[in-house]
Amino acid sequence: MKTKKAKPTLSTQPKLDLCQVHKADYATPKKPVLLDIGTACYLAVRGQGRPGGDVFQARIGALYAMAFTVKMTRKFAGLRDYAVCKLEAQYFFVGDPCGIPMDEWRWKLLIRTPDFVKQDDLDRAVATLLKKGKDQDVKEVVLETLIEGRCVQMLHVGPYDREGETIAVMKSFADSRGLKFAGPHHEIYLSDPRRVAPEKLKTILREPVTPA
Amino acid sequence: MTAGPSRATTLRDYKERLLRVLVVIQQQLDEPLRLEDLAARACLSPHHFHRVFTGLTGETLMGHIRRLRLERAAGRLKLSRWPVVQVALEAGYETHEAFSRAFKAGFGLSPSEYRAQRSADGRLPARCGIHYRDGGALRDFKTLRCGDRAMNGILKQVAPMRVAFMRHVGPYDQVHETWDGFCMFLGKEGLLGGGARFLGICHDDPDVTPPDKIRYDACVTVDDRFRPQGEIGVQVIPGGEYAMATHFGPYAKLGESYRRLVGQWLPRSGRELASSPCFEEYLNSPETTAPKDLITDIYVPLASQRP
């Protein structure tokens, strides 16, 4: 018997690009600025280990697998299309990161996602991915809402291991305004480290602040 | 007994082969020249011939032929009493006007002004230094220098890659439409992300093939369990040695990087091209990346070296 093939019904709404809609959140100033970051939804996955190490890369793979599967499943169903945003990460340090071995670094990888994406979408995507034999890591991906509020933000150009220099500039800027870093440290990766030379890598650094 | 050193294919070899082609072009300037025949004379696959040609001479094949015809026409204006319209027809132009326009664009004078000038150079600017010569005797030409815009090609051993693909036939700048449908299908099946690579196989050179006939395969790496379905097929990108270079910037300018890699870097590398098609790997997403920040690796297949 011939079965009828599912045909996609394309949504007539324009594709949503959150980076464009929230352009102010993705400012890339060469000097520190103060920003107010509103509520933002993300696909998120936590982990511990050296940034760029095996666990980190596996979790990036799981996060993107979820991001693409959720998006494309919705698109195929005729729901509103949106762009998969760039990778971001939060780092959780108690005290000075210089004193913590990189293998013990705790982080959360993030991809900003429209708020119309719901837990059901994630559940379906996990089922699809596990059926395809993808790594169990996809089950660790969750929906999260961040409200970072007042932040100091600045563009860091250069290798990741020299972010300290940019953070120092941001810190003295915060100090001069009677503010202190409240954590967690947040970064947004604008460049691809596989092909872009370390000294040219561009990363947005963001530090939530509170009155000192 | 020890085997002798393997003989590298040098820039000189490429030049000699291209010279054979350049002679044929001069001798048969009025014949319809087929790319396949010219490629065969140069012992190059039609896939790559045109890129080697433009890379070494700095002109497209058609641009080269048009220029030589105009130079010949300039000579005829000076040395014969042919009416301009006859010179135009002999130069391959269908109308006097089209010829005059092309002539003026090249020489800065209309054909009749040119004829009236006492001294006039019958040559148009050409970086390869080749100009029209009656009889087609050519001994050498200047290859385009790599200069500052040299392409940093590297040799890369590539493992065979099994890919799901969707064929696109049409202008290269419309492949995103094919990608759109292809990604939606693979994405909803859970086949994107988690290490899947995004590749494109270019079966035709957009510099040579008419836009509506360009064949391009949008590809995503898949494991052995994936089966072809509907418009989506499966193929294996052959493993082996490739010349690889990274293109930074808009996809519309990929052709320039291919020309530099195939036409300039390769002839100086000592290696020979294989006849299989080139492929490219897209490292970031055009959806969220400004065209100037797009990163694409381009791969050109190399023939295995003979001992």
Image: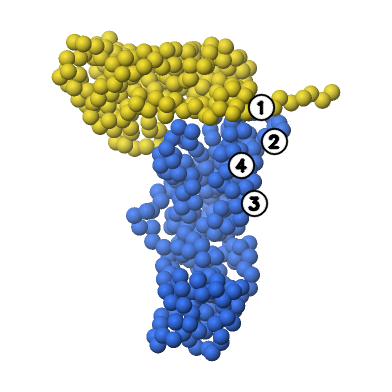
Chain colours: A yellow, B blue
Q: Position of residue B224 (x, y in %)?
A: 64, 28
**Relative to A142, A100 lies left or right:** left
Dot placed on the residue nearer the N-terminal end, 3 or 2: 3
Spatial CA distance of label 4 from label 3 is 13 Å
Amino acid, disc 2: Glu
- Distance from the alpha carbon under mark 1 to that under mark 3: 27 Å
**Which residue carries the number 3 mark?**
B213
Is there any visible trace of residue B192 in the rendered image?
no
Q: Which residue is identified by label 4?
A: B217
Secondary structure under tag 1 reads loop
Q: Chain of mark 3?
A: B
| Along the viewing direction, whichever of B144 and B256 lies nearer the viewer | B256
Q: Residues within 10 Å of mark 3 (few under 14, many from 20)?
A: some
| B213 with respect to A92 (left or right) | right
Q: Which residue is mark 1?
A: A8
In which quadrant of the rendered view does residue A5 lie?
top right
Q: Amino acid at mark 3?
A: Lys
The residue that label 2 is drawn on is: B231
Q: Are marks 1 and 4 on the same chain?
A: no
Residue A105 screen position, x and y as percent: 34, 15
Looking at the image, residue B59 lies above or below residue A111: below
The earlier-in-sequence mark between 4 and 2 is 4
